[in-house]
Image: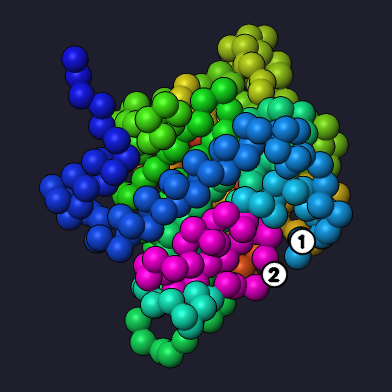
């Protein structure tokens, strides 16, 4: 019988063989995985655990918070604040950064997260997830500040997500490809179920919220319009569409079988570059997709090269199968 490889063993081996993971980063990833396990339990209980519904509060982005948004945020903070591996954390659900309290040792890492992605799907029992990104605190200086987080996505040292769907699955990169771990509930541990995930370069599947079509910019309209024309149009093939409204679930599908995901700028709120957040949604997902051979851009440039000017910065997102993302980038250049 082939031996099961747990997340712990995978990380130890990455540390030992490839020297890719310093011990503090390994601890950090184990703690994040443990927190995700506990969020997964809360998600599974649903109405029985009293976790559904709105919390009747708003986050800094003006979005109504769900109870699970707040629970997941607390679980991640409580799990991570005492281990000595972190200097500070930033989250979609917190206005400013959360500096590790003085009573605990401070480490060199910065953790960013979207504690609960796909909040509109919580109450309807559709897949949701947690997205995370790890940076290193810049050298020098005294205490940690919000500006220490303002690094490009290319500086990430680890990124991943955990999807709470029919299975609970953790997907991770430390810069050496993408590995997938499935939660074995009997054992209580994440088990390696796929290594070196690859996004095929071509696809016949796209994901976008079509209800916003009339608000899109011309290059995005052109791309989707050509897909919709199918066999009879310039693409000469039929396309399928999926939109789950949980970025984790859409990205998970793309990592598994290819596709292209778009949440582009639109004219509903023209001053905002997009809906999704750069630092804890687009950057980690962009890096995972690149590590699996795909591409991630905002139409003009690579997501991972964007220099953030604020923690909750938004961005237009186009990611997935490489040839499709390049085609959409070309359409942006032509108009
Ligand atoms: P969050 O729940 O963390 O605010 O993120 C929701 C995001 C993303 O997961 C998804 O792709 C998108 O919002 C869905 O937006 P629409 O409801 O506008 O389709
Ligand atoms: Mn989100
Ligand atoms: Mn969220």
Question: In which quadrant of the rendered view does residue 156 lie?
Answer: bottom left
| 212 shown above or below 306 | above
Q: Is residue 86 above or below residue 36?
A: below
Q: Where is residue 245 in the image (x, y as percent from the top left)?
A: 70, 34
Please indicate whether residue 278 sits to the left or right of residue 322 in the image.
Answer: right
Residue range corresponding to the magenta coloring: 73-98
The residue located at (26%, 32%) in the rendering is 5
Q: Name the residue under label 2.
A: 95
* Residue ranking furthest to the left: 17
Residue 45: image location, x then y, percent: 66, 33
10 Å neighbourhood of mark 2: few (<14), some, or many (≥20)?
A: few
Relative to 269, is 118 on the left or the right? left
Q: In which quarter of the image is the N terminus?
A: top left
Mark 1 vs ligand 3: CB below 8 Å: no
Magenta stretch: includes residue 97: yes
Q: Are the residues tagged 1 and 2 within 8 Å (C-beta)?
A: yes
Q: Which residue is drawn at 71% across and 28% down?
A: 125
Of callouts 1 and 2, the N-terminal one? 1
- Return the x and y of residue 239 as percentages of the image width and height: 62, 16
Going 69% across and 54% down the picture, which residue do you hit? 70
Considering every residue shown, the one lying at the far bottom of the view is 142
Question: Circle 1 sits in a helix, a strand or a loop, which is it?
Answer: loop
Query: How far from the left and from the top, in percent, is residue 147?
Result: 54, 78
Write down the residue under mark 1. Answer: 59
Give SS at disc 2: loop
**Camera-side residue of 131 and 176:** 131
């Amino acid at each position: 019988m082939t031996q099961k490889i747990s997340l712990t063993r995978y990380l130890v081996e990455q540390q030992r063989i490839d020297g890719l993971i310093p011990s503090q980063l390994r601890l950090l990833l184990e703690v994040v995985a443990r927190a995700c396990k506990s969020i997964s339990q809360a998600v599974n209980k649903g109405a029985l655990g009293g976790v559904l519904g709105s919390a009747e509060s708003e986050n800094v982005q003006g979005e109504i918070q769900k109870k699970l948004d707040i629970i997941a945020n607390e679980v991640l903070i409580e799990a991570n604040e005492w281990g000595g591996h972190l200097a500070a954390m930033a989250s979609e659900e917190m206005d400013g950064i959360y500096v590790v309290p003085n009573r605990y040792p401070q480490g060199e890492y910065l953790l960013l997260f979207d504690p609960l992605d796909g909040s509109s799907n919580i109450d309807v029992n559709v897949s949701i997830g947690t997205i995370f990104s790890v940076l290193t605190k810049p050298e020098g200086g005294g205490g940690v500040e919000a500006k220490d987080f303002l690094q490009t996505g290319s500086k990430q040292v680890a990124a991943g997500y955990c999807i709470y769907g029919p299975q609970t699955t953790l997907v991770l990169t430390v810069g050496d490809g993408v590995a997938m771990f499935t939660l074995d509930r009997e054992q209580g541990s994440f088990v390696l179920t796929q290594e070196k995930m690859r996004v095929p370069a071509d696809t016949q599947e796209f994901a976008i919220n079509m209800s916003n079509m009339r608000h899109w910019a011309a290059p995005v309209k052109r791309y989707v319009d050509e897909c919709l024309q199918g066999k009879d149009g310039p693409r000469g093939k039929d396309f399928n569409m999926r939109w789950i409204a949980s970025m984790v679930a859409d990205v998970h599908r793309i990592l598994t079988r290819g596709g292209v995901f778009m949440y582009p700028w639109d004219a509903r709120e023209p001053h905002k570059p997009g809906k999704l957040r750069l630092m804890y949604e687009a950057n980690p997902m962009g890096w995972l997709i690149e590590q699996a051979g795909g591409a991630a851009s905002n139409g003009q440039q690579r997501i991972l090269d964007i220099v953030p000017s604020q923690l909750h910065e938004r961005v237009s997102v186009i990611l997935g199968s490489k040839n499709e993302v390049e085609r959409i980038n070309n359409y942006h250049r032509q108009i």
